[in-house]
């Protein structure tokens, strides 16, 4: 299902990677948004990860159009292997200088790839660039969010007009237009990178493979990139983020467990890391986390023992607690 490469010299090749799973209703819109890109030099790599619906056939129906539009098309349908293994296979197939990642239910704006590539070509110190996302519902209609991230159709009732508005509100300590955006220290607690990002292919050589031991693969991926290079946020809507009943993020309990597992894996990785070549804030963040964990473990142990203790650590932390006093007059 592949065609030969057409050599185009004016634009670097961009590999668009799409992992598809149970999105028969949406994958066509996603693919058509890539067909409509004003940027021309694109290869398309899609893997259907064992969908139980008609996602595979929705892709096959568009295959002739895809092969006539893109310089190369790779499509495979496999037994379900999960997101991490599917992403490893997708990225192993890329030939482009840049990789554009999009979920199979999202929709890219026509100038998305062109805008992102232009930034990267002018700024070689960055490994990732991303824009804002507007929000659409299951039928593709533009929506907004109330304070509980419920879809509302009247902008007057909206708390957040874009996904970027929501992310900024939840991360008020981060200036999205500053150099702190995408730093390891700010990403260590959670992921706040919008959808539809472009990365340099060369960064993959540094960060290793996705693993089910870090099931929040997008957060883990951002952490790895931030160890070695900068990220950039463009204050321009470049993608429509679909918010519907099947979004994984709607399952809070599942997301919490995935976050805990990913955080533990990242911490274990840091404990055995060689920090050579990493960005300066990675080691700083690691040392702060070491201190925090040590203090927490020490205080917890002392509380259980019921000792009276004054802790003075590193010259700037002073914590005091003791057993409750017993008033002898009440005995």
Image: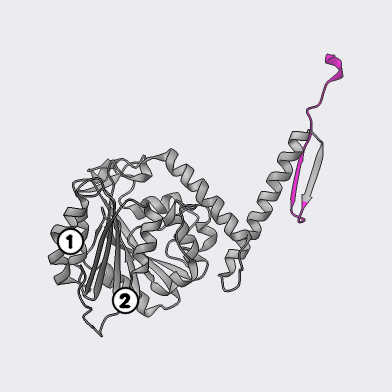
Give the total of numbered labels: 2
- SS at badge 2: helix
Question: Which mark is drawn over residue 286?
Answer: none
The correct choice, above or below, for 315 with respect to 299 in the image is below
Which of discs 1 and 2 lies nearer the camera? The answer is: 1
Residue at left 78%, top 28%? 324
Disc 1, SS: helix
Sort mark 2 into few (<14), some (14-19) or many (20+) by Cα contacts within 10 Å.
few
Using a 10 Å C-alpha cutoff, classify the residue at mark 1 as few (fewer than 14 neighbours), some (14 to 19) or many (20 or more).
some
For the question of whether residue 26 can be seen, the reply is: no
Residue 323 place in picture, x, y as percent: 79, 30
Q: Is residue 267 above or below residue 224?
A: above
Q: Is residue 316 magenta?
A: yes
Q: From the image, tell me which residue sits under label 2.
A: 118
Q: Quadrant of the N terminus?
A: bottom left
Decide which of 26, 91 is in the foreground and name it. Answer: 91
Figure quadrant of residue 274:
bottom right
Answer whether labels 1 and 2 touch (C-beta < 8 Å): no
Residue identifier under label 1? 32
- Residue 45, position as x, y percentages in the image: 27, 65
Q: Is residue 242 magenta?
A: no
Look at the picture and state if 94 lies above or below 142: below
User: Which scheme is used to colour this image of the protein?
Assistant: one colour
Q: Residue at x 39, y 62 (%)?
A: 88
Residue at the farthest front position: 79
State the image coordinates of residue 264 (x, y, percent, origin top left).
Answer: 56, 50
Magenta range: 313-331
Q: Name the image quarter holding residue 199.
A: bottom left
């Amino acid at each position: 299902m592949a065609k030969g490469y057409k050599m185009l010299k004016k634009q670097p090749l961009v590999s668009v990677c799409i992992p598809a799973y149970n999105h028969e209703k949406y994958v066509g819109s996603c693919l058509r948004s890539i067909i409509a890109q004003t940027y021309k030099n694109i290869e398309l790599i899609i893997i259907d990860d064992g969908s139980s619906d008609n996602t595979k056939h929705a892709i096959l129906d568009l295959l002739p159009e895809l092969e006539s539009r893109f310089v190369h098309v790779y499509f495979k349908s496999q037994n379900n292997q999960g997101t991490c293994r599917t992403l490893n296979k997708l990225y192993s197939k890329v030939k482009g200088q840049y990789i554009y990642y999009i979920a199979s239910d999202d929709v890219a704006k026509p100038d998305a790839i062109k805008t992102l590539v232009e930034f990267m070509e002018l700024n070689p110190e960055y490994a990732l660039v991303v824009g804002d996302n507007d929000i659409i519902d299951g039928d593709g209609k533009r929506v907004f969010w109330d304070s509980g991230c419920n879809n509302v159709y009247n902008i007057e009732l909206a708390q957040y007009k874009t996904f970027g508005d929501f992310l900024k509100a939840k991360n008020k300590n981060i200036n999205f237009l500053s150099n702190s955006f995408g730093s390891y220290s700010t990403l260590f607690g959670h992921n706040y990178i919008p959808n539809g990002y472009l990365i340099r292919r060369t960064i993959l050589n540094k960060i290793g493979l996705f693993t089910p031991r870090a099931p929040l693969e997008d957060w883990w991926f951002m952490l790895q990139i931030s160890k070695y290079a900068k990220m950039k946020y463009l204050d321009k809507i470049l993608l429509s983020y679909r918010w519907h009943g099947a979004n994984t993020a709607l399952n809070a309990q599942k997301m919490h467990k995935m976050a805990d597992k990913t955080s533990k894996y990242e911490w274990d990785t840091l404990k055995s890391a060689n920090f050579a070549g990493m960005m300066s804030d990675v080691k700083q963040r690691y040392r702060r986390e070491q201190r925090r964990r040590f203090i927490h473990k020490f205080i917890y142990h002392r509380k259980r023992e019921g000792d009276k203790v004054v802790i003075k650590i590193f010259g700037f932390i002073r914590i005091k607690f003791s057993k409750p006093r017993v008033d002898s007059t009440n005995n």
